[in-house]
Amino acid sequence: MTSTAIAIACTGVSVRFGDFVALSNVGLDVATGQTLALIGPNGAGKTTLLNALSGRLALSGGRVQLQGRDITAEPIHRRARLGLGRSFQIINIFPEMTVLENLRLGAQPMVFGLQPFWRGVQAWPGLEARAREVAALVGLDDALDMPAAVLSHGRQRAVELGLALMSDPPVLLLDEPLAGVGQAEIQATTALIERVRQNRTVLLVEHNMDVVMRVADEVVVMMAGEILTRGTPEQVRADARVRRAYLGG
Ligand code: ADP
């Protein structure tokens, strides 16, 4: 496989918090267009790996590449501008602002690449149209003028995803997009993830194995800061080590 067929990759990544080794020599690559799920017990290092890839924390060692380019030294906003989107486990939106206002803020990585930052996001002429397009994509076109706080948890998730989609990132990191979503909204939120993964590369941390089986092309299992195994969802579910370590079988 050539380097351009890999959307995002890391090699030899280690992260330490004091004496504690959260990631130890992790190597991972996600092929362009692939949806890869990261699973593993709590504390395995899944969120830390997303943070290492997105630039939210400093590496103790290793390198990160985005679409064939070494981004190890790039700060978080540069990685965003280079096409790396991110959503968070804890919903990261502005509850008192409307859906439309939230989506406008999501345009920042894109706008900052085009004009001096002091002109602000509002000055981008395509902003309104893009916000409406994204709202339609995530099923929020009927809620544009509502404060995010009044929406259900599942629809707040959709706002969060919408924020990440404003800059149309070719590579998207999703940290537990179903966290806190009630049973009644799991189907709708899963369908949304399926829509969002079209035409982009997605690395997804997710505990819900039904969802993983439905959306992931491949699964990587993490344990204690290392990669235990990688395979198709079926292979991983059948792996005795994974069942012992994680699935309780
Ligand atoms: P997962 O996402 O797989 O549940 P995390 O990546 O959140 O695991 O955490 C991996 C380990 O690193 C955990 O033991 C966690 O307590 C520790 N950890 C994560 N972030 C920090 C931090 N900022 N400082 C100290 N320890 C941390």
Image (cartoon, rainbow, N blue to C red):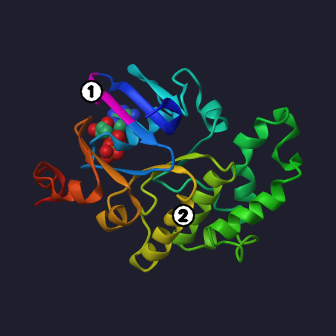
Task: Work out whether residue 112 or residue 172 is closer to the camera in this orientation and state it.
Answer: 172
Q: Report ligand 1 position as a quadrant.
A: top left
How far is mark 1 from mark 2, CA to CA?
Answer: 32 Å
Residue with the most extreme front position:
1
Residue 27 in magenta stretch: yes
Where disc 1 sits, the SS reads strand
Of the numbered discs in the image, which one, if any, rests on residue 20? 1
Query: Start and end of the magenta stretch?
Result: 19-28
Q: Which mark is residue 176?
A: none
Q: Is residue 223 left or right of residue 120?
A: left
**Mark 2 Cβ inside 8 Å of ligand 1:** no
Q: Is residue 29 above or below residue 183?
A: above
Is 232 inside the magenta-drawn segment?
no
Q: Are marks 1 and 2 in contact (CB under 8 Å)?
A: no
- Residue 69, by quadrant, is top right
Quarter of the image that includes the C terminus: bottom left
Q: Is residue 98 visible?
A: no
Q: Residue at x 44, y 33 (%)?
A: 9
The image quarter containing residue 128 is bottom right
Is the distance from the Cβ of mark 1 to the nearest ligand 1 atom less than 8 Å?
yes
Q: Amino acid at mark 1?
A: Phe
- At label 2, counting other C-alpha atoms closer than 10 Å, the crowd grade (few under 14, some 14-19, many 20 or more) is many
Residue corresponding to mark 2: 157
Q: Is residue 180 left or right of residue 20?
A: right
Q: Nearer the viewer, mark 1 or mark 2?
A: 2
Depth check: 172 or 143 in front?
Answer: 172
